[in-house]
Image: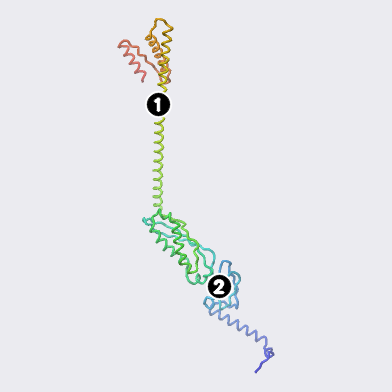
Amino acid sequence: MKMSRQSFSFVPNSVILSLCVLCVSILWRIGLVFNIAVDPAQCFTVSTSDVAIIEKWGRYSRTANAGCNFLCCPMEQMVGKLSFRVQQLDVRVETKTHDNVFLTAVVSVQYQVLREKVYEAFYALTNPREQITAHIYDVMRSELPTLELDAVFEAKEDLALAVKNALSETMTTYGYQILQALITDLDPDQRVKNAMNEINSSKRLKFAVAERSEGEKILTVKKAEAEAEAKYLSGVGVAKQRKAIVDGFKESIVDFSEGVNGTNSKDVMDLLLLTQYFDTLRDVGGAPHCKTTFVPTSRTTADDTRNALLQAEAAK
């Protein structure tokens, strides 16, 4: 039986409206039963650095990129989002070194979701931060016990590289890229740090004492050399002075003998020695620390006793 288009023109508008209301009611009841949205189309937005995971009837369907997106309800549902931003995880690890010193190491790991492995990053791991933390504990507690405390501070770069290689090998499979692993802090016990400071202080003090002793040795040697040189020059000066005195005596004796008739060399020597004697008394008496000058002119025992008493009194 062939039906024409005109046969549908006799359907009242009220019937069409009733059918639409019935469809909406059915969708609403489905939403109440399954707890899903009943809008035929739902609009949502995704940030620039994020990606949304869309499931259809509980099964992975697609990903929604940045911008305005739509869900076909009630079939599709957004179950989560992932961020492509670089994230950082700080982990504190307490372990001991080869010389049985306990220390706390802080490891900072910077990681990022791989764009081509969004499915693995969302569905493979329940908690990726706990997975990364477990690998950090495993690497640090296997590497640090092989090193002594002093070597640990020198091997920070090697430890960080070992952590990065171990994490990269595992986490890439799950859709995460390990950008950097850093050992940001190594903190031994406070008593150990005090002991290390004491050792360093003792070494520096020992070095300072050795340097000071070496300096004093150099000063002593230089002072002895200076005194030897001074005595040598003083001896040379005294020798030249005596030679000059002898030459002067010689000329004085010759001149005096020629100028005064009836004198001999002994008279001239006695006169010169007496002159030197009085000059010496004058120099001694003019010294600033000299108080009393005693001239030995005793002739009897009484004079000697008197002079001894005077000298003892002046020495008080």
The foreground one among 113 and 229 is 229
On the rendered structure, is 77 left or right of 303? right
Could you tell me how far apart the alpha carbons at marks 1 and 2 are, in whole angstroms? 102 Å
Residue beneath the point at 49% across and 61% down: 180
Q: Quadrant of residue 40?
A: bottom right
Q: Mark 2: few, some, or many residues within 10 Å (few <14, many ≥20)?
A: some
Q: Where 122 sits versus 92, above or below?
A: below
User: Which residue corresponds to mark 1?
Assistant: 232
Q: Position of residue 59 (x, y in %)?
A: 52, 77
Q: Where 170 sits versus 201, above or below?
A: below
Q: Amino acid at mark 2?
A: Thr
Q: Nearer the viewer, mark 1 or mark 2?
A: 1
User: Which residue corresponds to mark 2?
Assistant: 63
Q: Where 199 sits versus 86, above or below?
A: above
What is the residue that sits farthest to the left in this orientation? 301
Q: Amino acid at mark 1?
A: Tyr
Q: Quadrant of residue 48?
A: bottom right
Q: Position of residue 300 (x, y in %)?
A: 31, 10
